[in-house]
Amino acid sequence: MKITFLGTGTSTGIPTIGVERASCSSKDKRDNRLRSSILVEYKNKNIVIDCGPDFRQQMLRTGVTKVDAILFTHEHADHTAGLDDVRPISFKHGKIPIFAHERVIKNLSKRFDYLFDVKNDYPGSPHVFPNIIENKKFVLEGIEILPVTYMHHKLQVYGFRIKNFAYVTDLKKISKNELDKLKNLDLLILNALRHREHYSHINLEQALELINELKPKKTFLTHIAPDMGLHSETEKLLPSTVRLGFDGLEIIIND
């Protein structure tokens, strides 16, 4: 299994318009962060988790031209606004299956109604095939995926576990039963917004506490805000098994 960080930034990305922080003017490429998303390449399938406003740029940068499915964590724009940019992929490979909570599917079908219109034969319109998922294991092209549900302020969000890898972003509160789904991981990707407390995201201290409880073999942090500071400086604060993710980073997990 190969994991590629398509983006590791918070909803505004880094640099952020009108924000003067060291990370926004940094020459270190690791501090330049598009909106959070990953690509999972497994069993000859390309699965994208979240399709934000930087999707086109992210796909061009990776050189990936085929997407077999898109999983959505929730409906916020920084995780969904790039859905229209699946057009050239849809033209070449046909309808793209998307998987999300029923609430998210309804939200997307209103915002991108033309993608869901099966009667629309306009040749310039892409098409997606919606799949509603619940909080139970489902199978995508022979790949078992376990959703993990938690709260992002007052909004329910899904994380996803595939084998001994899990992707969890926009987490603020999680129940013990759901936390148990994240044990015995080889790799955890987890949000950590900044150093200070935040109302809808865990901060760095809370992320490290959660990691210490779960004890994955390796953790990379994502959904990072300018206030986190420079990549090179923040990494010095982390234990040996924890690192900051950065755009373009690739990780191989042995099956």
Image (cartoon, helix red, strand yellow):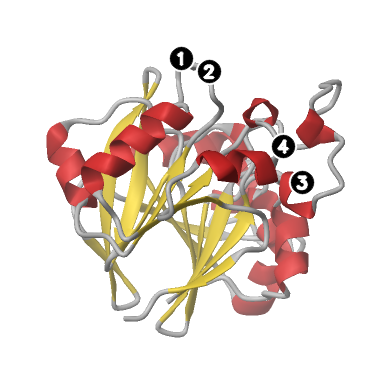
Q: Residues within 10 Å of mark 4 (few under 14, many from 20)?
A: many
Q: CA distance from mark 1 to mark 3?
A: 24 Å
Name the image quarter holding residue 86: bottom right
Between label 1 and label 3, give the one nearer the viewer.
3
Label disc, if present, on residue 196 of the rendered structure: 2
Q: Residues within 10 Å of mark 1 (few under 14, many from 20)?
A: few
Label disc, if present, on residue 216 of the rendered structure: none
Q: What residue sits 57% from the left and 70% below the top?
A: 67
Name the image quarter holding residue 52: top right
Q: Secondary structure at mark 3?
A: loop
Between label 3 and label 2, give the one nearer the viewer.
2
Kindly identify which residue carries mark 3.
Answer: 32
**Mark earlier in primary sequence (2, 4):** 4
Which quarter of the image is occupied by the N terminus?
A: bottom left
Q: Are marks 1 and 3 in contact (CB under 8 Å)?
A: no
Kindly identify which residue carries mark 1.
Answer: 199
**Mark earlier in primary sequence (3, 2):** 3
Q: Secondary structure at mark 1?
A: loop
Q: Are marks 3 and 4 in contact (CB under 8 Å)?
A: no
Q: In the picture shown, does residue 249 fall above or below 110?
A: below
Q: Residues within 10 Å of mark 2 (few under 14, many from 20)?
A: few
Amino acid identity at mark 2: Arg
**Mark earlier in primary sequence (1, 3):** 3
Q: Are marks 2 and 1 in contact (CB under 8 Å)?
A: no
Query: Residue 34, percent across and down?
Result: 71, 46
Q: CA distance from mark 2 to mark 1?
A: 10 Å
Q: CA distance from mark 4 to mark 1?
A: 19 Å
Kindly identify which residue carries mark 4.
Answer: 13
**Mark earlier in primary sequence (3, 4):** 4
